[in-house]
Image (cartoon, grey):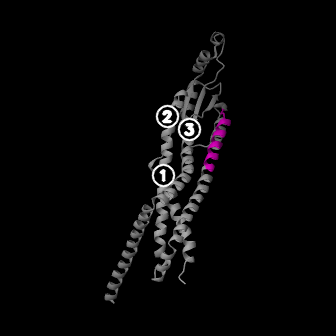
Amino acid sequence: MSDNKHQHRPNALNRFSAWLLHHLQSLVFSLGKAYRSPSATLMTVAVIGITLTLPSGFYLLLKNIQSISGDLRSSTQITLFLDMKLSLDSARQFNAQLKQHAEIADTRFISREQALTDFKQTSGFGKSLDHLNDNPLPHTVIVIPSTELDTLAIKTLLSRLESMAEVDIAKLDTEWLERLFTIVEIAKRSVIIISLLFSFAVLLIIGNTIRLDIQNRYQEIIVTKLIGATNAFIRRPFLYSGVWYGLFGGLLSWLIVELSIIVLSGPFDSLSLLYQSQYTIITFSFSDFLIITGCSTLLGLAGSWLAVARHLNEIEPK
């Protein structure tokens, strides 16, 4: 009984070692095959890279749009005109209470006297306003909502602030904000649709390439099956070929987008200076690089798997 267990363990270990060794051999063999036919490999990788460039570029464009919208969102303000009967101390205390709300990023208090002084300086009616018996302007609180709030949440916050006893009028220009959020949402869905369509195109490209490779090695596959090779054994080099195509295509796509950013950075910086903006173009992060190459590699594996599963079973020795 004990001897059988000891025999079983080495056999299992040997089988695993053989399985792992063949995977490594298939990995190296598929890479060597691609190296031995550089023109065909470069054409396939170029087509995949160019195909993936559009969704990758749109993804980066969306990141920049979201960054810009975040800056604009942070400039969203709710103006609270407080009750005229509210004293200065009570108004300051109310402003301090608002700062404790989790939905409010910051507040700015403007007293009645400061508001009148600012209005005299900006309106051009300074001398005329000096003849007023009373200050007609109320205490004002500028509320900056949290950047994590969407349009509906900001409107809800506006309604809640407007219902407070200390507030007389609450104002928020939401029309431009709604347009901004709608544009960002359209951009998100467009990127998803484009990514799905071009991912399907990559599957077709890699699947067709692997199909042609299977046809070119038809006789070799027949002989291999005659000597007892399983479909899994024959399948592995083709799967790794798809992995290499996907990986190299993803790397090329990343490189094309990065080079495009370098070319566009000069004119964009000049445009930013003209508009007195400090915004800089966002490039791919390391996690973005891993996502692009990882997704392209998975697409290569999926495309080759579909092609092999369909065509390899049709090849049988007669």
In the image, taking residue 176 as reference, residue 66 lies left or right, namely left
Q: Can residue 313 be seen in this view?
A: yes
Q: Nearer the viewer, residue 179 or 74?
A: 179
Q: What stretch is highlighted in magenta?
A: 171-190
What residue do we see at 49% from left, 37% from top? 265
Task: For label 1, count other residues whose C-alpha is less than 10 Å away and answer few (under 14), some (14-19) or many (20+).
Answer: many
Camera-side residue of 86 and 56: 56
Q: Which amino acid type is marked by label 2?
A: Gly
Q: Residue 156, percent across and down?
A: 65, 42
Q: Who comes first in sequence, dot 1 or dot 3?
A: 3
* Amino acid identity at mark 1: Leu
* Residue 223 position (above or below residue 42): below
- The quadrant of the picture occupied by the N terminus is bottom left
Q: Mark 1 points at which residue?
A: 252
Say which quadrant the C terminus sits in.
Answer: bottom right
Q: How crowded is mark 3: few (under 14 residues within 10 Å), some or many (20 or more)?
A: some
Image mark for residue 194:
none
Numbered disc in front, either 2 or 3: 2
Is 173 magenta? The answer is: yes
Disc 2 crowd rating (10 Å Cα; few below 14, some 14-19, many 20+) is: few
Name the one closer to the observer, 279 or 299.
Answer: 299
Q: What element carries label 1?
A: helix
Sequence-wise first label, 2 or 1: 1
Instruction: Identify the residue shown where x is 51% and y is 46%.
Output: 257
